[in-house]
Amino acid sequence: MSVSSTARRIGATVLAAGAIVSAAALPATAADRGHDRQPRVEISRVQADAPGRDDRSNRSLNGEWVEIRNTTRRPVNLRGWTLRDSDGNRYRFNDTRIGGRATIRIHTG
């Protein structure tokens, strides 16, 4: 079974995003102790390979996604955050908000 280039890109995106989200989530440890008020955001789920045939259509690409979850009760603005992979593909958030305890999904397509 071969891994599609899109799946590799999503996998790389998850790794890169994990590093970005982890760096952004570091202050959350202090927040849990009451020293900082920054909310915690994490990658909660990944669908790196769409079910069915990979034909590079939007339908196929939209079957590949990364979920980002806000684990606190406070909303978070992701403006300036970026998901990127080793191939140079990237998704930059503009004025995107995640509500408290909410999850958003970023699709490849």
Image: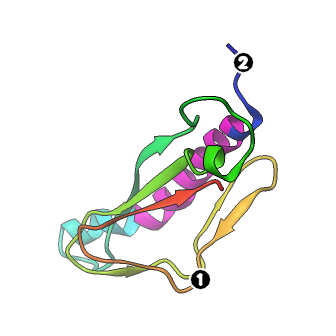
* Whole-percent x, y for residue 100 in the image: 25, 74
Q: Residue 11 appears in which quarter of the rendering?
A: top right
Looking at the image, how many numbered discs can be counted on the residues?
2
Q: Which residue was labeled with disc 2?
A: 2
Res. 47 mark: none
Q: Is residue 107 left or right of residue 72?
A: right
Name the quadrant of the C terminus.
bottom right
Viewer-side residue, 24 vs 46: 46
Residue at the (69%, 25%) spot, across then down: 3
Determine the main secondary structure of the stretch shown in magenta.
helix
Q: What amino acid is at disc 1? A: Asn
What segment is highlighted magenta in the picture? 7-25
* Whole-percent x, y for residue 40 in the image: 33, 66
Label 2 and label 1: CA atoms lie apart by 34 Å
Q: Kindly check if marks 2 and 1 are in contact, taking CB atoms under 8 A apart as contact.
A: no
Q: Is residue 98 left or right of residue 46?
A: left
Name the quadrant of the N terminus.
top right
In this picture the colour scheme is rainbow
> Seen from this angle, which residue lies furthest right?
87
In this rendering, is residue 62 above or below 20?
above
Res. 94 mark: 1
Q: Residue 88 appears in which quarter of the rendering?
A: bottom right
| Magenta stretch encompasses residue 17 | yes
Viewer-side residue, 2 vs 29: 2
In this rendering, is residue 31 above or below 65?
below
Q: In this rendering, which labeled residue sits more in front, label 2 or label 1?
A: 2
Residue at the (62%, 49%) spot, across then down: 59
- Mark 2 surroundings within 10 Å by alpha-carbon count, few (fewer than 14), some (14 through 19), many (20 or more): few
| Magenta stretch encompasses residue 61 | no
* Whole-percent x, y for residue 17 in the image: 57, 55
- Earlier in the chain: of badge 2 and badge 1, it is 2
Residue at the (29%, 67%) spot, across then down: 102
